Amino acid sequence: MMKRINYFIFALLLLSLFIFKDSIHISTNLLALFAPKESVEKLYIANELGYSKEMFIAVKGFDRRAKKDLKQIAEKIERLKGIKNVVYTTLPDQKIQNYFNQYYPLLATFDSTKLTKEEIKKRLNSLFIAQKHNFFYTPIDKNDPLKLFVMNRNTLNVGHKGKYLILADYGYLIKVTTDVDPSQMEAAKRLYKDVKSVISSYKNVIAFAGFFYSVENSAKIKADVKWIVILSTILLLTIYFGMLRSVKLLMHTTLTLMSSMIFAALICTTTIENFGVLSLAFGTSLTAVSIDYFFHYYFHSFYRKKKVFDKNVFLGYLTTLSAFAIFAFIPVPMISQISIFALLSLTFAYLVFTFVFPFLDIQEHRVKNIQKPFKYRVPAYVVTLFSLVLLAYSAYHLRFDNDIRDLDYQNIKLQKLQAVFANANKEKLSPVMVEASSQKELLQRVHLLAKRSAHSFSFATFVPSQKECDIQKRRLKEYDFKRLKNIINKEAKQLGFRENYFSLAYDFTDKLPSCEHIDLHIFQTYNLALYQKGNKFYSIAMVDDLNKIKDLQFATPMNAQVIFSKVANQMLRDILLYSSIVLIVIIALLIFSVRERFFYALNYILFPLAVSLGIIATFFALNIMNLFALIILIAIGIDYGIYMSASQQKSKTMLAIKYSLLSTFAAFGVLIFSSITALNSIGLVITLGCTAIYLLIKGMR
Amino acid sequence: MKYLFILFTLICSLHAEGFHEERYSYAFDKTQKFQGDIQFSDYGVKIVYNDLNKSILYDDGDLKVYDGKKLLSLDEVQEQRMGVFLDILILVHADDTQFIKENFSISLEDGMEILTPKEEMKQYLKKIELKKADAKISFIKVYFKNDDTITINIDDDETN
């Protein structure tokens, strides 16, 4: 019965997995793993407002063929699923046009200068001459013959040729608002495929949208990860089987690791809100670290001797546990979640390797190759000193890369395309989110932004503030249009115009519309949206200089790069703080557990950290993924330090650590072969750390 | 200005080279008469008022208006409007019936085609009357919103 307990545990966990499958919740919101709740909330609102959902299509050239292609493509794109609106001219849509017509007297610039009889006569005469003598037809505006009202409608931040939008010197431009944001992978893939299918039948047509990165990069990342997973699996199986040489033992070890992963995953995904898919993936890999408990037991014949307890393995486990327990409180959701997962999976694996494996009738390992240290070994205090010097050098030379985009797959082709479309805007503007407690206040606030930022683009570009509206109404009310109309009709008749031709002149100023209830939703085609959540109103405004509005509390810059830089910097501070606490606790535990061999054991953390940071400081920039890998390095380093410092059978301990290192390399180190910076950064640190630890077990005394 | 180009647009569908125009001004209750020639290239159009020695040249988005040999400068709004309607002119000349259908409702009355403007055109035009002879347009009358009208009679090929 006891010999089958491992299978029984695994079966029980599988059953639990089946029973609780409906309670399992895995979040695919990667943003929530890194960014604080407030930033995620703001980015969510920005998403609802349509920010990052724009797509651009450009047709090369300005000839008739290009214009024909432009219209055809726009029509085809408009019919695709996931498209909200398509714009390729500066002309407003019908709703906006109706708004302009209705609010014309309040929107147009009004010249309120009191005109003399002579001036009125002069202006009417020029109308008379223009219509009579121009060789092209020059219509007369009977409503505003003196041109007192001037409407400026070219307010879009996009270049244009005639009424058509253009992309600098490249050609005509189509601006598309989609329903798809970069995190909606399935919808993004479908629209990407549909758009490519439309433009592929035209020559010299290019397209770009933010979600193109998600689609193209995910394909590259998938391919990259696929071969790394294969490589990792082959390496792990080869190491385990090559060393254990027993299918039964391999089976039990693999089952234990899988049970530990299922146990941790089950608890985390059913109890932790928004447990992320990335945390699950890294937590699962981290479970492989627990194999060192088994190796240590196995190579020291723990199972044959039927010992109940091994102090060194327990201390190693306890120290690792303490480190992850501290990291579980870090305010970086991903690291906190991974730490909780590791706490659970390592504890489960420790318990099974310690209390279940002795019943599995495991044969004793026959040592074939005796592990020998290097001929010349360095004293521990020298290693400590060298590590401290290297850490000081690193602290001085280290540069922190807080640009989250550097971690992604570097899609040069798409980056170049994005740069081409960056020329579409006349002014380089940055998005800010404006928050207010009413629509009226929101308008006031976007107008305040517009005053600070001369080239801003927002609702303020099209909708007057209540104050502006009231001023214009007052000016129109105070102006003597009755007198003006009388003079116009009198003078016009004398000049030869038909009697009462201007009888309706300026009557449009009699009944002015209210500015209080303008429907802001009509400006969707200009990608200006209003979002209401509870009693808060939000909108995006584009401003030319963020510095000019930085004191305005209601305006939050929405540049993803800026947000993530802040998040990355905060993460660095948090990780440094929590790592310091972890180091203090580890030092205390080491003093308690290894006493006089304290520096010897501490070197298993200091030296790998110093080597990794020293090389990163010299050749690269430190990123958040490096930091994450350094935490893993601390976790594995503690165990080896305790084992080596307390070991009575150095050769067997060295062998156990060697296989553990190989296993860690197979799980994490292989990521060094990845072309994705995020994964490569983890692989680099783990590979350097594993190499450093190997040098220590062989070369430190 | 732009209404004139709507007329030209329609004229171009005739492939006519010469035209006579009667421009009625409601403001003065007077009619003016013009005549001229029109010539298309691949991406442009040239309109010449021979007796006035004035011309309009439009080539691939580039607009030039001449008084004799003197190049006239137009303000941005005026130039933009002309560009838009010259584009329309070229598209119609290229037999772009889609444009007509997009912007006008078409009906028949006493052997004449009546184009009633939709949406954007509605604020400038009341209607356009067209008469065809041998599948070619021979007569166009444009009714503007301000009660002005422009009547175009297309010359027969033999008279040119």
Image: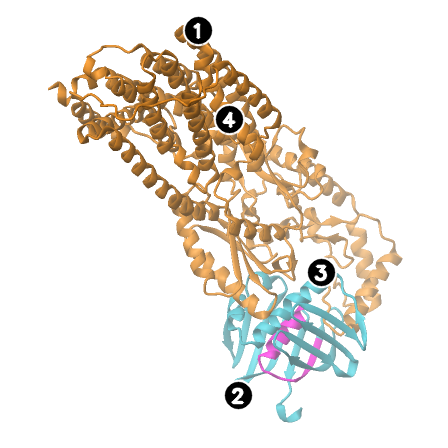
Chain colours: A orange, B cyan
Q: Chain of mark 3?
A: B
Q: Are marks 1 and 3 on the same chain?
A: no
Please state the horizontal and vertical placement of residue A171, each as a whole percent of the image. 60, 61
* Amino acid found under the numbered disc labelled 1: Glu
Residue at (72, 63) in percent of width and height: B78
Query: Magenta part of the protein: which range?
Result: B1-23
Q: Which residue is mark 3?
A: B77
Which quadrant of the rendered structure holds the N terminus of chain A?
top left
The quadrant in which residue A317 appears is top left
* Amino acid found under the numbered disc labelled 3: Val
| Res A94 visible | yes
* Amino acid found under the numbered disc labelled 4: Val
Q: Nearer the viewer, mark 2 or mark 4?
A: 4
Element assignment for label 1: helix
Q: Nearer the viewer, residue A249 or B50?
A: A249
Q: Nearer the viewer, mark 1 or mark 3?
A: 1
Q: Chain of mark 1?
A: A
Element assignment for label 4: helix
